[in-house]
């Protein structure tokens, strides 16, 4: 049986502040290692929309400065209804930091100016001068092993919501440095503040996204597991450093 994964990276030419494009490279490589045909479309500001959301299996969006978020904002708003439908139809999407923030209702930047958001989720973010920066360790709420998830965060934004969080903060700041939550999960939408890039540091999360995207169209039990011995050793180094 042949497998294909159709991936769209959105705004990676603008929202890639801490190498979040590494998430796309990780998904691509993990598909190639399995013999899964990786079909990539890139979309950004002033690009033609040359794909149908019904054909997408996975969307990846990275993070950015307040300035780049405001550049993306108006274009992202054009995608609002399609993105909301995609999420409600269990479409798999990973949003990192600034893009995570922009799926909410409000984002006030460090100057108190409002950057227009998609208003898909009831999330409010307010940015402060003292940024939340550093390596971060969380325990995931996806039921995945290892339960630990590692990354790097650098955001002024303090995000508050009542959705299921991606994880509980063990070391670091998380959504707002107050409620010990990091990120959010809704259906197959994941928002997180974890850069790193995120997926190469956490192969189990990369496969969670790949398998969830594939199970919408294939019998995923026939997709081979990978030997992640090296990846998990690197992951363990960070876990032990941060515990
Ligand atoms: N500009 C946003 C903030 O400072 C997001 C930063 C990011 O994507 N790393 O909170």
Image: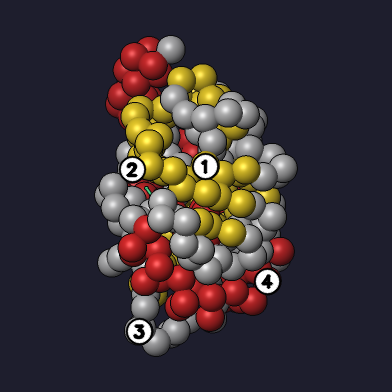
Residue hosting label 4: 85
Q: How is the image coloured?
A: secondary structure
Q: CA distance from mark 1 to mark 3?
A: 30 Å
Where residue 22 appears, x then y in whole percent? Answer: 30, 49
70 or 227: nearer the viewer: 70
Q: Is residue 219 visible?
A: no
Q: Are marks 2 and 4 in contact (CB under 8 Å)?
A: no
Sort mark 2 into few (<14), some (14-19) or many (20+) by Cα contacts within 10 Å: many
Where residue 38 appears, x then y in whole percent? Answer: 39, 63
Q: Residue at x 38, y 42 (%)?
A: 129
Q: Quadrant of the C terminus?
A: top left
Q: Residue at x 53, y 69 (%)?
A: 116
Residue hosting label 3: 46
Where residue 170 appears, x then y in whole percent? Answer: 51, 19
Q: CA distance from mark 2 to mark 1?
A: 21 Å
Q: CA distance from mark 4 to mark 3?
A: 22 Å
Residue hosting label 2: 197
Earlier in the chain: of badge 1 and badge 4, it is 4
């Amino acid at each position: 049986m042949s497998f294909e994964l159709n991936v769209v990276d959105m705004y990676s030419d603008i929202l890639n502040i801490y190498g979040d494009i590494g998430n796309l490279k990780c998904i691509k490589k993990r598909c190639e290692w399995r013999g899964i045909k990786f079909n990539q479309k890139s979309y950004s500001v002033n690009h033609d929309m040359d794909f149908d959301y019904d054909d997408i299996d996975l969307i990846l969006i990275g993070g950015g400065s307040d300035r780049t978020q405001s550049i993306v904002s108006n274009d992202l708003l054009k995608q609002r209804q399609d993105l909301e439908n995609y999420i409600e139809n269990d479409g798999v999407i990973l949003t990192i930091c600034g893009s995570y923030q922009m799926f909410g209702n409000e984002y006030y930047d460090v100057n108190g100016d409002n950057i227009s958001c998609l208003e898909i989720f009831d999330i409010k973010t307010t940015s402060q001068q003292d940024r939340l920066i550093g390596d971060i360790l969380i325990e995931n709420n996806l039921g995945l092993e290892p339960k630990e998830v590692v990354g790097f965060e650098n955001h002024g934004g303090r995000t508050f919501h009542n959705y299921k969080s991606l994880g509980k903060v063990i070391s670091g700041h998380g959504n707002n440095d107050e409620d010990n939550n990091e990120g959010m999960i809704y259906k197959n939408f994941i928002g997180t503040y974890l850069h790193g890039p995120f997926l190469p540091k956490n192969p189990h999360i990369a496969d969670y996204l790949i398998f969830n995207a594939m199970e919408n169209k294939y019998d995923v039990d026939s997709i081979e597991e990978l030997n992640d011995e090296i990846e998990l050793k690197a992951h363990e180094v960070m876990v032990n450093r941060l515990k």
